[in-house]
Image: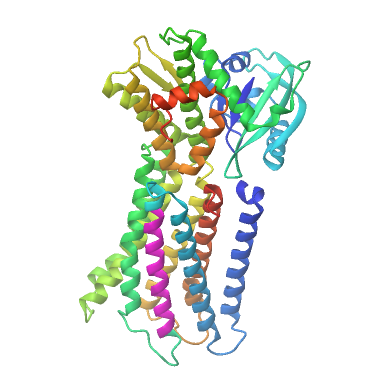
Amino acid sequence: MLVFTDERGAVVLIEDELARALGFDDPDDAVGDPLAATLGLAAAEAEALLNEISASGGSRYRLAQLRNQRTGRSWWVMASGSAAVAEGRFIGADITLTPPAYTLSADYLSHRYNLRQLAELVRSRLRDGSGLVISEEKEKELGSYFAARMLALYVLVVRMAGRDLGATLEEKVRRLNRERGWSMEMRRGRVTFGEADLPPEAWREIAQVAHAYAISVTSKRIVARELAELDVNFSRTTVQRATLYGLRTDV
Amino acid sequence: MVILRQDRRSFRFAVGAVAVWAAFSLAYILGPFGGDSPTWIANIGTLLGAWSVAVLAMLLWRAYAPDEVGRRVWLALFLGFLLWAIGDTVWAFYDLQPGGEVPYPSPADVAWVAGYPFLWAALWMRYRSMEARPGRRQWLALALIVPAGVVVFGYVLWPILTYSGYDRLIEQALDALYPVGEFILFTGAVLVAVAMHGGRLSFPWRIIALGIIVLSLADLVFAYATWNDLYVIEGTPNAITILADAPYMGAYAAIAVGEYVLGRLEGAF
């Protein structure tokens, strides 16, 4: 399970399942809180984990005790993390929490791996019936690609320019959807699709708006690198199809 | 601050800038090389800072792609800082002439005044491109900016505007323009830094804002000191002259640090 923070250790993104296990009805309620408060860790323990990640680019596996903020129930996990970087500079921590018995691979220490997890997280949300009405598997994968890209852009904007501007990005997308009558919602970076199908130009235009905004607050170089790292987690066919649909506005 | 701990080059640059500023300020106050040395030291320190800021702004401008907002922002900042560096150079030229008086207005004023619109435009473009929505922090920033504006208007601008002893309108206009220009810059820099609060880019913008704020204050002290004939152009500086000149050098050092850290984050350096 995955939790992303910004450079100060405030939660930027948390996996739904993990948030629920920690006692949050809505995963978004955990966003913005310090890592220690969200996971129920001791402040010193969370700080040590974040310091190790920011100083060395990753952390060794360590045992950590999580606590459900509502029931007080606690359980042990293995915590590891990798640093998210922009142009070599630390912009946040990607923290993975797994059961202690789980066999961990060295991949867990890479930001690229965590972007794969992010992509998988988006796929599972769409699979779990969050309202995407598209029948074919290919289109589902394209929807996952679109949602993963939007989430990655949101996380990047929050990490680089703060949560207020992350909210501005969402507001821009919302406004566009309202104006065009498209049924799609974006909240804390999470994309959910409504009942009606989105026309191809909707995907394209929304992707363009998000991409252009991320560039305007950061830079083309930083955005391109983050999206390139996300792209390797999708099949070549999906990426080619996304290019064809105009979702990859950076190419 | 986190980035200074994590990026050694940024840390070294910041330490170097502070050390150079401290060395120039100490030498300026103590005047170790005799009579006119404080004047030379203040001018050299200012020129070093002003040209460093202009060169770093140029490097940042060139690091962005032609169609990026960042490129337009940094082009405007580069032109503004370049004109200020030219203004400081012309001022130094007059100031370092033996027994020379700096005319007012002088060509230095032309360059300084011409620099303002570029700097205002740059901060406006930066703020507008972020499309920040008015939030609690923005209102809080405005709550700080408005009283500062009242102070500037009441203690600096109003006496200038109501003074009837000016021989030439151009002098009165310039005296009024400088505090207004600085106040607009101060407002823009604070709003940009506040909009990015919590993000990685907020730290360098905060440092740049801090530099602009210090610059504004130093200019206000200079305006006050010259208005009251307290500013010492040649010889050992008095307290108010030091309060105008040492922060002026420090402001450029802060802006240079902010630019460098931003460049490191954006991958420009």
Whether residue B75 appears in magenta in the rendering, the answer is: yes
Residue placed most toward the observer, A182 or A245: A245
* Residue at x 63% of width, y 32% of height: A111
Whether residue A152 appears in magenta in the rendering, the answer is: no
Q: Position of residue B42 (x, y in %)?
A: 51, 78
Q: Main secondary structure of the magenta part?
A: helix
Q: Can residue A32 be seen in the rendering of this structure?
A: no
Q: Position of residue B235 (x, y in %)?
A: 50, 87
* Residue at x 52% of width, y 88% of height: B36
Residue placed most toward the observer, A132 or A72: A132
**Residue B183, image quadrant:** bottom left
Classify A158 as above or below B154: above
Left or right side of B10 for B165: left
User: Farthest residue toward the bottom?
Assistant: B99
Q: Position of residue B254 (x, y in %)?
A: 52, 61
Residue placed most toward the observer, B202 or A61: A61
Classify A21 as above or below A152: above
Left or right side of B4 for B163: left
* Residue at x 60% of width, y 44% of height: A89
Q: Position of residue A110 (x, y in %)?
A: 67, 32
* Residue at x 65% of width, y 28% of height: A95
| Magenta range | B73-94
Classify B247 as above or below B193: below
Left or right side of A163 for B143: left
